[in-house]
Amino acid sequence: MTFDTQRLHGIIPPLVTPFDSSGELNLRGATQLVKYLLKAGVQGVFIGGTTGEAATLTVEELAKLTEVTVEAVAGSVPVLVGVTAASTRSTLQRVEAIVKYGPDAIVAHIPFYYPHTQNEIYAFYKELAAGSPLPVMLYNIPQTTKIPLAVDTILRLAAEEPNIIGYKDSSNNLTDFRQLVVALQTTRSGFRVFLGTDLLQDTAIQMGACGTIPSLGNLFPEPLVQAYQSARQGNWSEASRYVGIIAELTGIYAAGKESDIGNCIASLKYGLSLKGVEAGQPRSPLQPLDAAGEQLVAGMLEQTKTDRKQSN
């Protein structure tokens, strides 16, 4: 059955990967997280992304995570799976390991470690598109891959490869994103584009994006969904109000003292644990929060409860 790409829209959180106290996959926690997000009204889920500590997962772990996620979602929203490894061959091995569980599409950033040229990047995605039985989404995150995915390369792939159906941009380069959206109007209509941002839900829609893929959506999905829906309806003042709430909630990332990505993952996981989701701690060498960080996260969650009661 051909995947209906129009189903790709809205708020699609990049899920954290739950681990138990020994650092092994916690599949019960993964199911709890999916059900929590579906109840909040998200329009999709994305496992095996940067927030999901994908670089620490084995092929077997990614396959197990895909199996339980697809089962928990039960077709209600699209399931995206990150598959990138250090080479084209190892990326395709990940695709082969997950395809039997029935996810809707794969997401692949540039293979890591080597600073690839755009010609090498182009060749990677051409081979991936040809070898994958699942639709492919491009993923631009130069913070971790060293090299950006150039607009010209994206346009070339979109024009040539029907199995490449969309693009996630986590580069924070809105100028390039806007140029891409404009060029796609004549290059490939229907190509699905997303901003990987916790903020800018209203801006994303104004710029022609299909939605956002926000890490904060793990812990606070409701205001993100509300911001997106308001923007889609053209209620810009309401969308802006929700984005203001989201901006305050990103203060949760100040709980950590290490790397930005590590802070994000540790804070989200601890916050989820307070909500009853067995998210565990980040995998070493990423570090969990210290006592002061845990106190900050707990305080923010308590404040959101108070704010919600006062607004009702």
Image (spheres, rainbow, N blue to C red):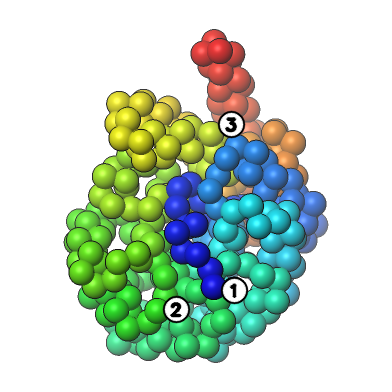
User: Looking at the image, which is closer to me, 173 or 251?
Assistant: 173
**Residue corresponding to mark 2:** 163
Q: Which mark is residue 1?
A: 1
User: Looking at the image, which is closer to me, 312 or 304?
Assistant: 312
Q: In terms of sequence position, does the residue under pointer 1 or pointer 2 come before the other?
A: 1
Q: Is residue 22 above or below residue 137?
A: above
Q: In terms of sequence position, does the residue under pointer 2 or pointer 3 come before the other?
A: 2
Q: Residue at x 58, y 67 (%)?
A: 104
Quarter-wise, where is residue 232 in the image? top left
Callout 1–callout 2 Cβ contact below 8 Å: no
Q: Is residue 287 above or below residue 60?
A: above
The quarter in which the C terminus is drawn is top right
User: Looking at the image, which is closer to me, 192 or 258?
Assistant: 192
Is residue 256 toward the left or the right of residue 183 in the image? right
Closer to the observer: label 1 or label 2? 1
- Image spot of residue 35 (x, y percent): 70, 45
